Each structure stands twice: as C-alpha cells, then as structure tokens.
Amino acid sequence: MKIIPVWILFLSLFLLTNTAKSVDVEAIRSLVGFFENLSRNFSQSVPVSGWNRTSDPCMSKWTGIMCYDQIPSVKSIVLNDFNLSGTFNPSIICNVASLSTSIAVISLEDNNLHGESFDTIANCKSLTHLYISHNKFSGTLPDSLSRLSNLKKLEISDNGFSGSLPSLARISGLIEFTAQNNQLSGPIPEFDFLNLVSFNVSNNDFSGPIPQGGDRFTATSYFGNPRLCGDPLPDKCEDPDSAAQNSNVSGESTKNGPTSTEILMYSGYALVGLIVLLIIMFKVCKRGKKQEEVIKEIDHKDVSTAYTFASNEFKSVGMSKSEGYNGTSFESGPVSSSLIVLTSPEVNGLKFEELLKAPAELLGRGKHGSVYKVNCEEHHMTLAVKRIKDWVLPSNDFKLRMKRLNIVKHPNVLPVVAFYCSRQEKLLVYEYQPNGSLLKLLHGMSTGQTFDWSSRIGVACAIADALAFMHNELHPDGIAHGNLKSSNILFNKNMEPSISEYGLMTMNNTDSSPLISDTFQHSNGDQNESAFRADIHALGVIFLELLTGKMPMVENNGMDLATWVVSVVKEEWTVEVFDRALIREGASEERMVNLLQIAIKCVDRSPDSRPGINQVAVMVNNIKEEDDRSMDVSESPFSMRR
C-alpha cells in the first residue's frame, strides 16, 4: 500500500477546516449583489466594512452582518439608518439555499429604499423578523407573505403600501405587527390577537368592523381609518337591516306627522323621566350628611378616569421620537393621598396624585388589568403601575395580603413597593424592569441578543428556587402565584430574572382549565391546594418554552404546548421538540432531556401526580450543577490534551 506523505494530510486538513468555517461563494456573491442594489447613490457618511467578493461575511465581520456562533451561516442583516437609497430585492438572497434557510432577521428601517414586489421574500422560510419601516415602498402586499411560517415580528409602517392586507392568521407565532401610515384599504383580516404583543394599523384606509379580539388593543391602534367601526373605537357598527328599517320608519313619521299613539308614548316617557328626577333629588338631599365621603369618591373617580386617559394619550399614534407626553394636572379638589408605601426607601414620600400627574405609557392590557410605565421625575425613578380589575377580594383582605407579601422576600421575586386601595380602584406599584419579559426574550428576541443553554437553565433554576421559597413561606396563608407565565418573568438591568405579580390572583380569579382536577372538593383548603398545584403546571410550561422556543398556546395542529410536547415524546421523537438554536449551539442533549422529563411531570393532567415544588427545585439545581461542572472542565487547561 502506498504511503501518503504527511504534508499532504496536513494540507488536506487545513483546507477542510478553513472551508468549513467559511460562507460559500454563491452566498457571498448574492449578499454583495443584494447590498449593491441597496446602496445606489450611497452616502459614505456611514462607515461600512466588508460587503465585497474577496472576504468572508462571518470571518471578516461585515458591517450589519451577524452570524451564528457555531456554524458559518449568516443569521441577520441589520442596516438601519444607513442613508441607503436603492431597491430592496430579497430574491437575490432568498433564492440561495444556504441563505434562505439561515437568515432570521432583515432590518432596513429609516433608509430611502424603493420597491414594489415582495413575492420572492416568501422563500426565506427561516425569517423571523422583517423590519422595512420608514421607506418608500409601494404596491400591494402579496398573499404569499403568509408563507413566512416562522415570522414573529413584521414592521411595514411609514411606506406607501396600498390594496388589501393579506391574511396572516396562519402565522401562529406572530407577536408584533405594525403597518401604520400606509394606504392599505379593505377590511382588517383575522389575526390571532391573543398571541399579539404589539399591533398598529392606524392612518390607513381600512373599513368595516374591527375583527373579533381586536379590542385587546387601544383605539390608538386604529385611529386614522374613518370607515372603521366597533370596539375599541367610539364608532359602533350598525346592522344594515336595522338601519334600513329605522330609515323607513323615520320617513313615514316625517311624512304623516306624529300619531296619537306616539303622542301618548312620548308623554309617558316624559312622566317617567320626571319621576326619576324627583327620586334622585330626594336621595341627594337625604345623603347630605355624608357629603365628605361622596366628595372623596367623586374625586377618586375623576382621578382614576384621568389616569387612564393620560396613559392612553401617551401612546398616541404617529408620535415622533422628539415628541412625548408631559402629563396632565388634575385640579378636582382634595385628592386622596392614601398611597401605602411599603419598605422601599426610594419611593418614600410618593403620593397618589404624583403618579397621576407623571408621564405614563400603556405597556399592556390583559384579562385581569392593565400595566403602565410611569416616569416620576421628582423621585428620579421609573415605576410600573398595575391597575387591577374584577378583583373579588375585599379591600381589607387586599391590604392584609399586600402587607403579608411584603414580609416574604426573595431576590428573584419582584416586590410591590407601594399600593393604593379603595372600593373603586386597586393599584400596585413596582420598580420598572428595563429588559422586558421572558416571553419577549424567547419569542421576540432583539437583534443580536443571544439566549444560550446556560442562560436558559440558569433562568429555570432561579424561577424554581424562588417559587419553592414562596410556596414554603405562604402555603399556610393559602397564597399561591395564581397566574405564573413567561410574560410575568421579568429581567432587570443585569438580566437577572424576577417573578412578578405573585399572589395577585385568588382562586376565584384563576381560569378553570386542565390545571384543576375534578377530584378536588370545593372547600377553601382544597381550592388553595389546587392553586399551588396549578403553579407547578405553569412552571412546567415555562420549562417547555425554554426547551422548545415555542409559544405556550396556539401551537402545532391547534394544540397547546404541553399537549404537543407530550404527544411528540410518546412517538419517540424527543429531539424534535428542542429549539433549533440549542441544537446548533451544541447544548448537552442529556441535560435537555433531563429538564424535559421534569417539565412533563409538572404538566401532568392529574394534579396529584405532579411533583412537589421542592422536589422540582432540587432536580433543576442538579442539572445546573452538572452544566456548571462541564463548563469548568471544558475551560480547564488539561481538557486541551484530549
């Protein structure tokens, strides 16, 4: 057998390793062509490196190009505010296999681009974020846009798009859609509004009723469409049949004059109105001794209404970056200052009316209330205010619960720093967490932000430990979380997770669902136990989100995430459930499977079969310790000798 020289082996190995670490030539040629179309009449005021056929976009770190860590593949193209003045032609990159299956983000906001056809972009199956706002695109949006099955964020605002909006209901993971300031017309198609975090179609030419579920967003999301009707807009939709009938009746009455029957009917109305007026006057006079209490209640209603108005006004559509909301001064007599500050020295001296006068922004509106971001300039801090609705707990019990929760502290549980309570209104004040929620991090990840396996197992461990501590401390009081979900896991400025809104939901406020078994009786003790078991189920769903990268609801074939994962695992396709980003990263399959097994136990349909929270916390900590040990070994100098 002929012996191969050693230098040939080394040369072959060198060529193989360098080829494996490079983006293929066809992809580089396509990227350069894509940029050349964008950069016609390009202003050199913005420095740009790379974007030539003689270098590699990942190894040479081209401007605006981001690549995956483990594989030589382009992850995103971000060219915001580059003064580009050309044509957006996605077919150049979407028709290249190595690019169309890897690019997740295309962002070209605030340039001076033109373009009319978007059919070809539907070939980019892996695209999750598409930002082309503040450009000069025109023409219609194709129906093929709905084929972007992995899309999470779509921003096409401030362009010249016209025609009808294609249906995007098939994109089950879409969480953000903004199309304001275009010329789109026709009815608004159906959306999965429960899945959307942000939605805006203002300043177009849409007509007809707002689709079912669209009232989750404020009227500002629909302003500037004079032919739209229905909640949350003040213009109600009129039934065509009843409108025609009313028109006929009105025409006949005008022609023939009022009949004797109508005269008697109107006289009866007037008499009833007079009687009601007399009754009201009598009651007002009778309650004169309670004037002080009445004044306080009226003042509070005025302030509460003004707060909601101010918050909604802040989120006005089309507001430029230089504009803002300066707050509103309310002069309606003596305002109650009974804001109860707990143990936070930063907000000592803060009063209720100061919250109302401060600039406010509506962050979200949910089933159990709304959340506002409030800038208290006098106290040099930003707060988050939760306004609770449909609270079944009496005011005294509410105050006792807040004070009890204030005693139980854990670093990964967001404390209430102050609260306000009256018969009409209940407000909770938190310190604002600037880095958003776990929901947004997993399903609406910001460009360039990574969320690797070690970060995910760290979040799982922190949440499990915090929940175990709270359950152990508050089990005698019967206070569970009641509404644990990824949107209630918030990150502070150091990206440390915190469980928010602990204990806000009582048993009567929680949804009836598979979380609560029929085997439980309806006594208070068993109801409280059901709430703690429901927290275990919710924690298991969060673990599944961390492992799969999928939304908790509206997943494959209409199943919720837990049902889908269990069905896939039963078919022995376990690896198929894991997030592709974790697979590409090279995360330990053994440790992912271990966490998956814990999650499946937590989401068992029988509450009695779910593990205890302390057992869950111990098991998750064991996985994290194994992961930490493996990282220490891999970073050891002795590991290089293998």
Image (cartoon, rainbow, N blue to C red):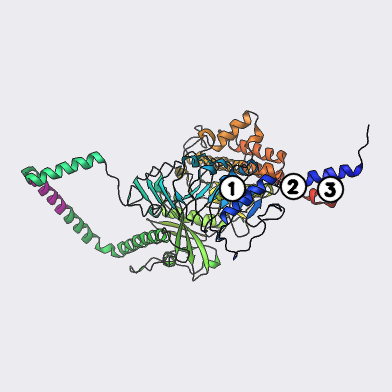
Q: Nearer the viewer, residue 278 or 364?
A: 364
Residue 13 as seen in the image, left or right of residue 472: right
Q: Residue furthest left?
A: 260
Question: In this picture, which residue range is highlighted in magenta?
Answer: 263-275
Residue 619 can be seen in this image = no
Q: What amino acid is at disc 1? A: Leu
Q: Which quadrant: the C terminus?
A: top right
Which residue is rendered at x = 93% and y = 36% of the image?
3
**Crowd tier of the residue under label 3, counting other residues whose Cα lies within 10 Å: few below 14, some 14–19, many 20 or above:** few
Contact, CB < 8 Å: mark 1 with mark 2? no
Q: Using the numbered discs, state the Cα–Cα distance from disc 3 to disc 1 in whole angstroms.
A: 32 Å
Residue 92 as seen in the image, left or right of residue 6: left
Question: Does label 3 or label 1 sit earlier along the sequence?
Answer: 1
Q: Using the numbered discs, state the Cα–Cα distance from disc 3 to disc 2 in whole angstroms.
A: 23 Å
Q: Where residue 213 appears, x then y in whole percent?
A: 41, 44
Residue 624 as seen in the image, left or right of residue 309: right
Secondary structure under badge 3?
helix
Query: Would you identify the image quadrant in which residue 564 lies?
Result: top right
The correct choice, above or below, for 54 with respect to 573 in the image is below
Residue 270 as seen in the image, left or right of residue 608: left
Q: Where residue 420 appears, x then y in whole percent?
A: 44, 60
Residue 453 can be seen in this image = yes
Q: Which mark is residue 442?
A: 1
Which residue is rendered at x = 73% and y = 47% of the image?
22
Q: Which mark is residue 21?
A: 2
Q: Which mark is residue 348?
A: none
Question: Does label 3 or label 2 sit earlier along the sequence?
Answer: 2
Q: Where residue 106 appears, x then y in whole percent?
A: 57, 50
